[in-house]
Image (spheres, grey):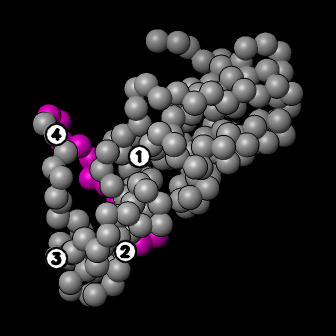
Amino acid sequence: MVTMTALEEELLRIAGDVPDPELPMLTLDELGVLRGLRVVAPGAVEVELTPTYTGCPAVGTMAADITDRLRERGMAEVSVRTVLSPPWTTDAISAEGRRKLAESGIAPPRPKEASGPVPVELSVRCPHCGSLETTLLNRFSSTACKSLRRCESCREPFDHFKEL
C-alpha cells in the first residue's frame, strides 16, 4: 500500500470535490472515478481517472475540471491519465453518492452481491414513491450509463443508474 503525503491527500480531496459533468449532484469522489493522485515533482501532479464506461464523453471535461482546480492550488503541471484496469463498477459509488442520486430522482444502482453475477432484470425502486412496480421504457436514457423507467404506482418517469 502506498502512503500519501499530506499534500497528496489535500490535492486528492480537491480533485475529488469536482462535480461530475453529467451528474452534477455527485462529486468525482462520490462517483468513484478518481483512482489515484501522486506528486511527481515540485508543482507537478499525476491524476488517475477511470471513466464509468469506455468512451464516456465526460472524461475530457472531468480532466479539464480537475486540471483547473489543481492549478488554482498551485500545481503548474497537471497530468490526468485515463486508467481502464481495473474497470469501474457501480460498486465504486459511495453511500453518499447513492443517497444523492435517489434524492435527485435517479434510482441508484444496487450494490453487487458478495458473490455471483449482477442480474440482468432487476426490480428497481422508484425514487419518488418507493414502489418496486416499475417498467423499463428504454435501455438508454440521458446518458448511456442510465436507463429510463416509469413507476406503475405514481406513474412518474425516472432514470435508473445501471448496475455494472
Q: CA distance from mark 3 to mark 4?
A: 23 Å
Which numbered circle lies on residue 93? 1
The residue labelled by disc 2 is 158
Circles 1 and 3: CB distance less than 8 Å? no
Which amino acid, by three-letter code, is at mark 3?
Glu
The residue labelled by disc 4 is 117
Q: Residue 136 at what x, y percent from top left?
A: 25, 71
Quadrant assignment, res 112: top left
Between discs 1 and 3, the one toward the N terminus: 1
Q: Residue 157 at what x, y percent from top left?
A: 35, 80
Between discs 3 and 2, the one toward the N terminus: 3
Between discs 1 and 2, the one toward the N terminus: 1
- Is 155 placed above or below 118 here? below
Give the quadrant of the C terminus: top left
* Badge 4: residue crowd in 10 Å (few <14, some 14–19, many ≥20): few
Q: Tell us which disc is closer to us: 1 or 3.
A: 3
Q: CA distance from mark 1 to mark 3?
A: 24 Å
Circles 3 and 4: CB distance less than 8 Å? no
Magenta range is: 102-115
- Is 85 placed above or below 96 here? above
Q: CA distance from mark 1 to mark 2?
A: 19 Å
Q: Residue 88 at what x, y percent from top left?
A: 41, 36
- Is 76 placed above or below 141 here? above
Which numbered circle lies on residue 64? none
Residue at 47% across, 60% down: 143
The residue labelled by disc 3 is 133
Left or right: residue 30 versus residue 132 is right
Q: Is residue 111 magenta?
A: yes
